[in-house]
Image (cartoon, rainbow, N blue to C red):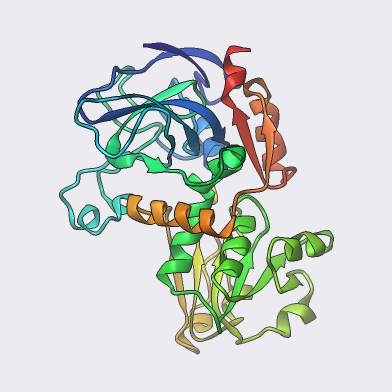
Amino acid sequence: MNIKAYGALAAEQPLKPLDIIRRAPSAYDVQIDIAYCGVCHSDVHQVRSEWAGTLYPCVPGHEIVGRVSALGGQVSGLQIGDLVGVGCIVDSCQSCADCGDGLENYCDHMVGTYNGPTSDSPGHTLGGYSQQIVVHERYVLRIRHPESQLAAVAPLLCAGITTYSPLRHWQVGPGQKVGVVGIGGLGHMGLKLAHAMGAHVVAFTTSESKRDAAKALGADEVVVSRNADEMAAHAKSFDFILNTVAAPHDLNAFLVLLKRDGTMTLVGAPATPHPSPQVFSLITKRRSLAGSMIGGIPETQEMLDFCASHGIVADIEMIRADEVNTAYERMIKGDVKYRFVIDCASLTA
């Protein structure tokens, strides 16, 4: 089936309207009419080949929400008209230990929603900046938020699970002091989720002007990280720090804020590496520096259900598809509160 999409034909070219082909649903496939698709910073890295391996045409988008419009004959548990989502994963091997644990995100053969290998034309997956997508039922997620919140649910499929997964894995909850570094697309979700989990939440920002915004998102305290006195006042006091910054920066400044046995987990993915942390920042208090990448399908569904039950959605700015190039430039400058979402109805406007 031919459908409308928005994508890039080369790294140095802007995104533009494209016609792409989606397969007809097979026995276990779900066809989804896409209502909204979030814009992730990784979309920029992929489209512009800042990460190796981009395949063109590149149609980005892995924060997809919409309605089921057709079902394969063997699909169970879904009906036409259901509100559903698709995140970063559309296939995996289903035979390795990671897949067996519901952690398809760590499968060596995980297939991304765009730029991943597939037998469909053109030989790699094409993402959610499009009218429609066809996905195996295993990777389709139920949305239980009110339909009126659907656009703001879209970023949960990446920004939400990227921050929820480490918070859950390191068992963040009441009685813990938790830091969130950065108040952007990822960080604003980290603040909301850590607050909902019952932790005492401290936001770190480089901007004095973001104090009130951070508190509105769930921060109990706000620290301007450029202020040495404010940073020193929190030395050796954090159980866990979620670092969402997607640009290289000094990790030692935050590692020394951890208690003995505390952990800082990185979820931001910079185009160039961070400076190496000092070993003594780690060994003197048995601190850990860790990483986390999105989440598996069961955990992503758990996150969506948690957010629905707590009334959590992303703070978004809606755009038309033809505004996406401008949105990329604004996002790079940090000029968005806090996530762009494409109204996919605009693809036919």
Above or below for 68 versus 228 = above
> Residue sitting at 65 percent across and 27 percent down?
325
> Residue sitting at 30 percent across and 55 percent down?
103
Q: Quadrant of the C terminus?
A: top right
Which residue ends up furthest to the right in the rendered image?
A: 209
Q: Is residue 216 left or right of residue 93?
A: right
Q: Camera-side residue: 218 or 280?
A: 218
Residue 48: name its quadrant.
top right
Q: Quadrant of the N terminus?
A: top left
| Residue 312 location (% of width, % of height) | 59, 55
> Residue sitting at 62 percent across and 19 percent down?
346
> Residue sitting at 62 percent across and 61 percent down?
192
Q: Is residue 120 left or right of residue 201?
A: left
Residue 321: name its quadrant.
top right
Q: Is residue 338 left or right of residue 313?
A: right
| Residue 148 location (% of width, % of height) | 61, 38
